[in-house]
Amino acid sequence: MRLGWTLHGDGARITPGEVVAPHERLSWPRTVGIGLQHIVAMFGATFLVPTITQFDAATTLFFSAIGTIGFLLITGNKLPSYLGSSFAFIAPILAATASAGQSAAIGGILATGLLLALVGVIVHFAGAHWIQIAMPPVVTGVIVALIGLNLAPVAWGSCTADGCTGFQASPVTAVITLASIILIQVLFRGIVGRLAILLGVVIGYVVATLRGEVDFTPVAEADWFGLPHFTAPSFDPSVLGLFLPVVLVLIAENVGHVKSVAAMTGRDYDKLTGRALFADGLATTLAGLGGGSGTTTYAENIGVMAASRVYSTAAYWVAAFGALVLSMSPKFGALINTVPQGVLGGVTTMLYGMIGILGARIWVQAKVDFSDSVNLTTAAVPLIIGIANFTWTAGDLEFGGIALGTAAALVIYHVMRAIGRWRGTAQG
């Protein structure tokens, strides 16, 4: 592994048509500046997950930084990536917390990380071609889509004697937050447009503050400097089934990240796919040991690389250490935890819908043929199972809509395709 970088050109300019490769860097002031852009790019999404799931924000950021450092080391400092909070964990965390408590949800994250790390080891030695065979685009797309659509009721929220959650908590604040996100996307270009969710949350937060919906007492009481709050995991077999589908999503996200960086840099990174999966699995495992959210490679930071044409891993080292410093401020974490329910209701209405549409985007990009009855059925049945949140209990285990929908997608596709080939009725 090589931790040094060669200077790209004069360190100040990038010739048209060229990119700054992972083993290169610009001058250190410019590299630090780009690293700070990566912090801003990952910030909104990384903090949104613990805010929604009631995890400690500083702890999540701490493990995000540690995970990124580990990813860079394990991939030999050759694959630029930031590991932030994965949205795929939101649904199982919420379900597990409601039924068995937060420590059981953390145990589910730990189990997911271990399984993903194991997959990474297998891929490293066996190759990544079998992933495409086991999880073709129609299956991957439906798994991603049903995770987002399964969360729709959470965005709307509910009301009890203790108050309301989600959109119902403050419809005015929620609408302003949602409208801000929508308008920023079309009013601004570049990095501002890509940070629409973060900026929309900021605008909604300001509105909520003016409306008296924010309690700053925890912020005032928190220290400026200190270690994050760590929470030990516990294991409840009844909730582990909720987390298994997340492994499939993380596999798809990591493989997609490797392919994207390869396409943008003109290099072949297929041999690093197993290491990338193992590194993300290890990062998620560490997060599960201490109470952080599970991690994944971040598309937001791919956007920064595409805009800047700088793929230097040096910028990610800067981002990782910058995030580590921020995680050492309890006051900063307490501020994040004051985001009110109205703001969360507005932003999750957009976020969960986007997750659902990302599944459809996978279908479009892969040109999935829905005139093929196998593909159509593979998508149709699991989506209804996920949206309606079908539930099946087997002893101490309980499988929700996401787990059952994921299983249905895999079984329906492979069984129908096998029978179709046997009977000669298969279209593809």
Image (spheres, rainbow, N blue to C red):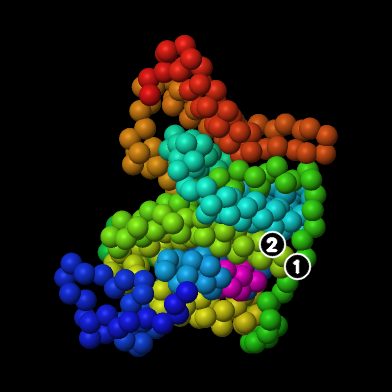
Quarter of the view holding residue 19: bottom left
Q: Is residue 220 above or below residue 393?
A: below
Instruction: Say whether residue 268 is visible.
Output: yes
Q: In the rendered structure, which segment of residues is drawn in magenta?
A: 59-68
Q: Main secondary structure of the magenta part?
A: helix
Residue occupied by mark 1: 231
**Tag 1: residue type?**
Thr
Farthest-out residue, left: 16
- Residue 26: percent from left, percent from top: 31, 82
Q: Residue at x 40, y 42 (%)?
A: 362
Quarter of the view holding residue 192: bottom left
The mark closer to the camera, 1 or 2, is 2
Q: Is residue 416 above or below residue 320?
A: above
Q: CA distance from mark 1 to mark 2?
A: 9 Å
Characterize the local packing of mark 2: few (<14), some (14-19) or many (20 or more) Cα atoms within 10 angstroms.
Answer: many
98 to the left or right of 382: right
Q: 419 or 217, which lies in front?
A: 419
Q: 422 or 136, which lies in front?
A: 422
367 to the left or right of 346: left
Helix, strand or loop at label 1? It is loop
Instruction: Say whether residue 90 is visible.
Output: no
